[in-house]
Image (cartoon, grey):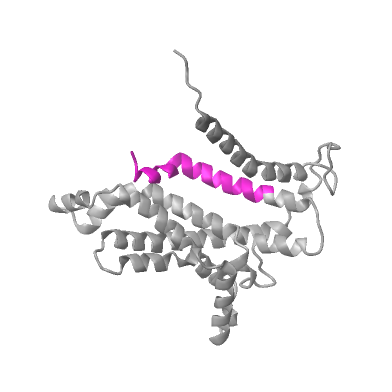
């Protein structure tokens, strides 16, 4: 039996390979820069060296990294709680303003983040509350941009959850809270974890929102990297980038292993 040649399959494979290269090549360059001895990498490479890692694993970089992780974790948890509650209410509500409210909650994705940051700065200046600039305000603003991600992923999970299942549990004697936690919540779990992970990554890597909302003594990692690059270049930056990427990939891998993140696409667990 002869197989028919299908050009669209070849085209799809080529496009997939190009996309993978587009994603992988910059990361390969960054990793290589972090393990070679020269300030400015050259080809062919002159050898391997870990000399730049001594400068990367210092308080100058570890403290901003820890602050970024704390802000990202706090904002992801807040976005998860508020986004999940909003999504559940929107999916089960029957009011006329559902579409408008959903669109309003998604507006942080439509507005440039630098505009949101400037707006927050103007607001706290009008309120004479510039003392709020720092980690608490970062958590609030990062929560705002994290909610739309939770809204989408949890919404996709709820598409596969029939409201009649929860109603049947209540008919069998379960309280509304028990019906929700026993029937609906487990099926939302993968979408919730996926949304929280997206919110965490967006917060950890955020530059625009953090640019005007950090203090001189407490910078997040992206702002510290940006300020460092304004005055000098060093492969130490590549080492710091590799460290943060490895941390995020480790979190994503563990979460995917134990929470089955991709199952939210199918509407809960299968």
Residue at point 37%, 51% (across, down): 156
Q: Is residue 229 left or right of residue 98?
A: right
Residue 265 lies left or right of residue 145; in this view the side is left
* Residue 69 visible in image: no
- Please give the name of the residue rendered at 49% of the width and 52% of the height, measured from the top-left corner: 197
- Give the vertical position of 108 relative to 3 (above or below): below
Which quadrant, please, contains the N terminus?
Answer: top left
Residue 141 seen: yes
Q: Quadrant of the C terminus?
A: top left
Magenta stretch contains residue 112: no
In the rendered structure, the answer to whether residue 9 lies left or right of residue 88 reads right
Which segment is the magenta one?
242-270
Task: Locate residue 101 relative to residue 255 in the image: left or right.
Answer: left
Q: Position of residue 65 (x, y in %)?
A: 64, 57
The relative height of residue 213 versus residue 188 in the rendered view (above or below) is below
Closer-to-camera residue (41/48): 41
Q: Nearer the viewer, residue 15 or 21?
A: 15
Q: Where does residue 149 sit, x and y in percent of width and height?
A: 45, 57
């Amino acid at each position: 039996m002869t197989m028919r040649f299908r050009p669209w399959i070849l085209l799809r494979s080529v496009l997939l390979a190009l996309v993978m290269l587009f994603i992988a090549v910059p990361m390969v360059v960054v990793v290589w820069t972090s393990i070679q001895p020269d300030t400015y990498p050259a080809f062919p490479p002159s050898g391997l060296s870990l000399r730049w890692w001594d400068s990367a694993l210092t308080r100058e970089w570890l403290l901003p990294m820890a602050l970024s992780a704390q802000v990202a974790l706090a904002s992801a948890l807040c976005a998860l709680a508020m986004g999940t509650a909003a999504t559940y209410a929107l999916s089960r509500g029957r009011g006329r303003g559902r579409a408008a409210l959903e669109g309003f909650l998604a507006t942080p994705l439509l507005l440039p983040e630098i505009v949101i940051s400037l707006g927050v700065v103007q607001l706290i200046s009008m309120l004479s509350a510039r003392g709020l600039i720092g980690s608490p305000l970062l958590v609030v603003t990062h929560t705002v941009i994290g909610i739309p991600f939770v809204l989408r992923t949890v919404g996709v999970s709820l598409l596969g959850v029939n409201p009649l299942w929860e109603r049947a549990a209540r008919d069998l004697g379960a309280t509304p809270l028990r019906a929700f936690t026993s029937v609906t919540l487990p099926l939302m779990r993968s979408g919730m974890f996926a949304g929280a992970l997206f919110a965490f990554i967006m917060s950890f890597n955020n530059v625009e929102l953090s640019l005007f909302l950090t203090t001189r003594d407490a910078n997040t990692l992206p702002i510290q990297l940006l300020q460092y690059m304004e005055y000098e270049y060093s492969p130490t930056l590549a080492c710091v980038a590799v460290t943060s990427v490895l941390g995020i990939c480790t979190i994503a891998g563990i979460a995917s292993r134990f929470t089955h993140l991709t199952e939210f696409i199918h509407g809960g667990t299968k």
